Image: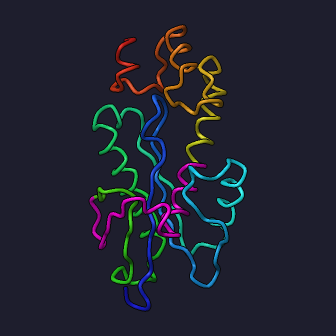
Amino acid sequence: MNQNQLICGVDEAGRGPLAGAVYAAAVILNPEKSIMGLADSKKLSEKRRDALALKIKEHAIAWAIAYSTVEEIDELNILQASLLAMKRAVESVQASLVEIAPLNLLVQVDGNQRPKISLPCEAIVKGDSKVQAISAASILAKTARDAALYDLDRQYPMYGFAQHKGYPTAAHIALLRQHGVSPVHRRSYAPVKALI
């Protein structure tokens, strides 16, 4: 990595749940404004993630959050929909960085798959615990997805989205059986498909 190269970290949240969009974030941290406590979002409490998300948005050189809809997940499959959300997040960051030559940007993505983007891109397995910018992206993606699930909980209170965030818990499956499939459930997922 050359001296003036910037890292754009990218991660997604919400591949496993049965409902709601899948979110992705892209973050370019400011090397001069370090943020203490960045880690894989799954290892942090919700309160800690929310506090860090505010710091990331305040101090990062650039950040963006994007998503793929339930319809896109069902149409493309969850992996492709996740990569599409990542692509949208990166392109949004790119658009906000007109003054930085794109040659100086290296995109690092959590996992073993890369989105189809025009910038140089590396996939890093367990990147969210190895690369600060990916940790930051994982936090923004997770907090955005959680916020969206609280909204869905207000729209569809009978499913308990605020508690399980759409993940296939026993309680969620029981409520799905009781109330049927909502417009925000992923119809291509086996437990949902079984109830249609």
**Which one is in front, 153 or 142?**
142
186 shown above or below 125: above
Residue visible at 29% across and 73% down?
A: 120
Q: Is residue 83 left or right of residue 126?
A: left
Residue visible at 40% across and 19% down?
A: 192
Q: Quadrant of residue 87?
A: bottom left
147 shown above or below 43: above
1 shown above or below 11: below
Residue 71: x, y in percent? 37, 32
**Which one is in front, 87 or 1?**
1
Quarter of the figure that contains the C terminus: top left
Q: Is residue 132 magenta?
A: yes
Count of numbered marks? 0
Q: Residue furthest top?
A: 178
Residue 116: x, y in percent? 27, 59
**Which one is in front, 120 or 122?**
122
Q: Is residue 66 magenta?
A: no
- Range covered by the magenta-colored residues: 116-143
Structure colour scheme: rainbow
Residue visible at 34% across and 22% down?
A: 190
Q: Quadrant of residue 33?
A: bottom right
Residue visible at 58% across and 61% down?
A: 39
Residue 26: x, y in percent? 47, 62
90 shown above or below 18: below
Quarter of the figure that contains the N terminus: bottom left
Q: Is residue 154 left or right of residue 71?
A: right
Q: Quadrant of residue 154?
A: top right
Residue 67: x, y in percent? 45, 47
